[in-house]
Image (tube, helix red, strand yellow):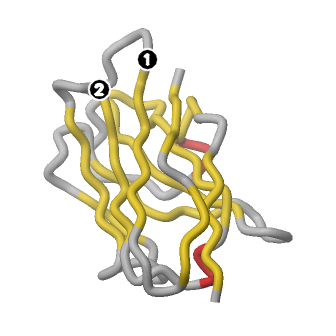
Amino acid sequence: QLVESGGGLVQAGDSLSLSCAALGWPVTNFAMAWFRQGPGKEREFVAAVSWSGDRMDYADSVRGRFTISRDNAKNTMSLQMSSLKPEDTAVYYCALDSVQIRVGLTTDQAQYSYWGQGTQVTVSS
């Protein structure tokens, strides 16, 4: 089970941190990612971190503003968001790769087999 937390209502330019906790079993060997779905939009890739934590990938729209990280000892993943914009408003989901010890990272939603319930992030202008 993946459980997200940390969403909320902020103003443009503010920062916010999201967390994702994996409960019940270790996810050390699996890459993890954040996706988001804005109002009236399809779900889209935001950021991913490798199973080892040493490789990251970001959507162009958040690169330089968001930072993904993980703590395998705590079975958690985080997304630090800064310089938030109204277009960042969305439900944010954490997801777990379906492949153990994948070489590289994937932005393909179909490659992620477990999903959290989502946490709402609203950025006002």
How many marks on residues? 2
Rendering coords of residue 26 (x, y %) = 31, 16
Residue at point 85%, 70% (across, down): 40
What amino acid type is highlighted by mark number 2?
A: Asn
Counting other residues with Cα less than 10 Å from the Cα at mark 2, is it few (<14), some (14-19), or many (20 or more)?
A: some
Q: Is residue 50 left or right of residue 58?
A: left
Of residues 53 and 9, the one drawn nearer to the viewer in this rendering: 9
What amino acid type is highlighted by mark number 1?
A: Leu
Rendering coords of residue 103 (x, y %) = 26, 45
Placement of the C terminus among the 4 image quadrants: bottom right
The secondary element bearing badge 2 is classed as: loop
Residue under numbered circle 2: 75
Is 54 placed above or below 64 here? above
- Measure the C-alpha gap from mark 1 to mark 2: 8 Å
Residue at point 32%, 33% (across, down): 76
Rendering coords of residue 43 (x, y %) = 69, 60
Is 97 placed above or below 26 here? below
Residue under numbered circle 1: 23
Is 51 placed above or below 34 here? above
Of residues 65 and 123, the one drawn nearer to the viewer in this rendering: 123
Which comes before the other along the chain, label 1 or label 2? 1
Counting other residues with Cα less than 10 Å from the Cα at mark 1, is it few (<14), some (14-19), or many (20 or more)?
A: few
Residue at point 41%, 25% (across, down): 22
Q: Is residue 6 left or right of residue 102?
A: right
Residue at point 55%, 80% (across, down): 11
Question: Residues at badges 1 and 2 in contact (C-beta under 8 Å)?
Answer: yes
